[in-house]
Image: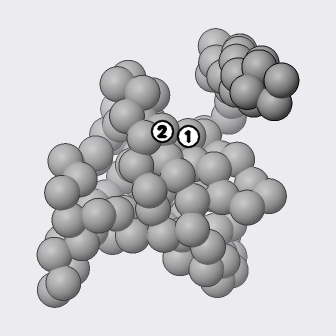
């Protein structure tokens, strides 16, 4: 089932650096966030990023975490990509993944402080 991006719900500019984790591969990509809204977001992806259309990812930027599908990805003149996201409701599995990752990072940082 293909999900279309819904632009009628307002997005606001949200210029920020962030990371995106591709759920099926757990690949981490440094991204630029352009705008966000209740129905999704748009990102700038590095030129070497593979086509993510149809993939789900977790976007982390400043004070926001979003679970979303990549619904479009367009090459820009400078070689980078612009991607449109459609937000998804967090599933129990995705939330558990996030909590487990946060716990592991916290334990790692504690052991390095000693």
Task: Give the camera-side residue of 94 and 98.
Answer: 98
Does residue 12 sit above or below 85 in this rendering? below
- Asked whether residue 64 is in view, the answer is yes
Task: Give the camera-side residue of 104 and 73.
Answer: 104
Image coordinates of residue 1 in percent, x first then y, are 35, 32
Q: Earlier in the sequence, mark 2 or mark 1?
A: 2
Residue 21: numbered disc? 2
The Cα atoms of the two marked residues, 2 and 1, are separated by 5 Å
Give the quarter of the image for residue 41: bottom right
Residue extending farthest front: 114
- Residue 72 lies left or right of residue 15; in this view the side is left
Residue 58: numbered disc? 1
Q: Residue at 31% of width from left, 40% of height from top? A: 54
- Residue 104 lies left or right of residue 27; in this view the side is right
Give the quarter of the image for residue 12: bottom right
Looking at the rendered structure, the secondary structure element under dot 1 is: strand
């Amino acid at each position: 089932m293909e999900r279309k991006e819904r632009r009628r719900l307002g997005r606001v500019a949200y210029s920020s650096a962030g990371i995106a984790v591709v759920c099926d591969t757990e690949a981490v990509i440094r991204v630029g966030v352009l705008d966000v809204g209740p129905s999704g977001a748009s990102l700038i992806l590095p030129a070497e990023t593979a086509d993510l259309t149809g993939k789900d990812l977790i976007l982390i930027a400043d004070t926001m975490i979003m679970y979303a599908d990549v619904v479009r990805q367009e090459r820009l003149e400078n070689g980078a990509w612009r991607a449109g996201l459609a937000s998804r409701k967090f599933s129990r599995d995705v939330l558990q993944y996030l909590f487990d990752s946060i716990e592991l990072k916290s334990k790692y940082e504690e052991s390095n402080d000693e």
